[in-house]
Image: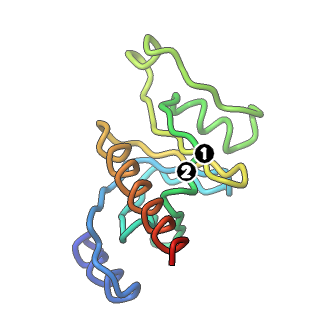
Amino acid sequence: MEDEKVLSILEKKYGGKISWSKRCSFYADSLGHVREDGVLLYLTDVTFRIWCEDFEFSFASLDVLYTDFVLKTDAIDFVTGKIPKVHRASPFKFITTPRILCLELEGKKFLFFEMKGQEFRQLLSIAQAKQKYSHTVSDRN
């Protein structure tokens, strides 16, 4: 199904506007999902959501503890249990090996996405600030 159709269905399902979306060409997580054909990552308010034909997953912006780029091979080895930890790779290795974005979430969950640029990190910062502001306002009331 085309991404536009999927996004339209998901907007109706969650009752909110999808402000950003990105097709990620690779996805893996510490829950055992590995998708070489990728997933659709999108943002509703301060919640990031992952959609694939056989699963969905979501996380709030403040659930993200850490982001960094790692080697794709290390991410696959970590998710499949071949190595106990995934480490940030030296920038020199990125020249010859594909890099992917690693997110560490609360509860020791890890997500790995292949996407270009810093767009996600910028959106994450904005969503985190928005979510912190919402908490501050609700705490005052």
Please say if 76 is above or below 7.
above
In the rendered image, the residue lying farthest to the top is 92
- Residue marked by disc 1: 104
Q: Which type of secondary structure does the marked residue at label 2 adopt?
A: strand
Please say if 129 is above or below 47.
above
Residue in view at x 29 percent, y 36 percent: 117
Marks 2 and 1 close (CB-CB < 8 Å): yes
Type of residue at label 1?
A: Glu
Q: How is the image coloured?
A: rainbow
- Of 13 and 36, nearer the camera is 13
Name the spot of residue 121 as percent of width and height, x first: 38, 43
| Distance from Cα at disc 2 to Cα at disc 1 | 6 Å
Please say if 38 is above or below 58.
above
Name the spot of residue 39 as percent of width and height, x first: 42, 59
In the rendered image, the residue lying farthest to the left is 4
Type of residue at label 2?
A: Val
Residue in view at x 54 percent, y 45 percent: 103
- Residue marked by disc 2: 64
Please say if 30 is above or below 56.
above
Name the spot of residue 32 as percent of width and height, x first: 67, 55
Please tell me the numbered disc located at residue 39.
Answer: none
- Of 128 and 107, nearer the camera is 128
Name the spot of residue 13 as percent of width and height, x first: 39, 88
The quarter of the picture where the N terminus appears is: bottom left
In the rendered image, the residue lying farthest to the front is 140
Q: Earlier in the sequence, mark 2 or mark 1?
A: 2
Residue in view at x 26 percent, y 81 percent: 8
- Of 5 and 44, nearer the camera is 44
Residue 55 visible here: no
Q: Is residue 37 left or right of residue 7?
A: right
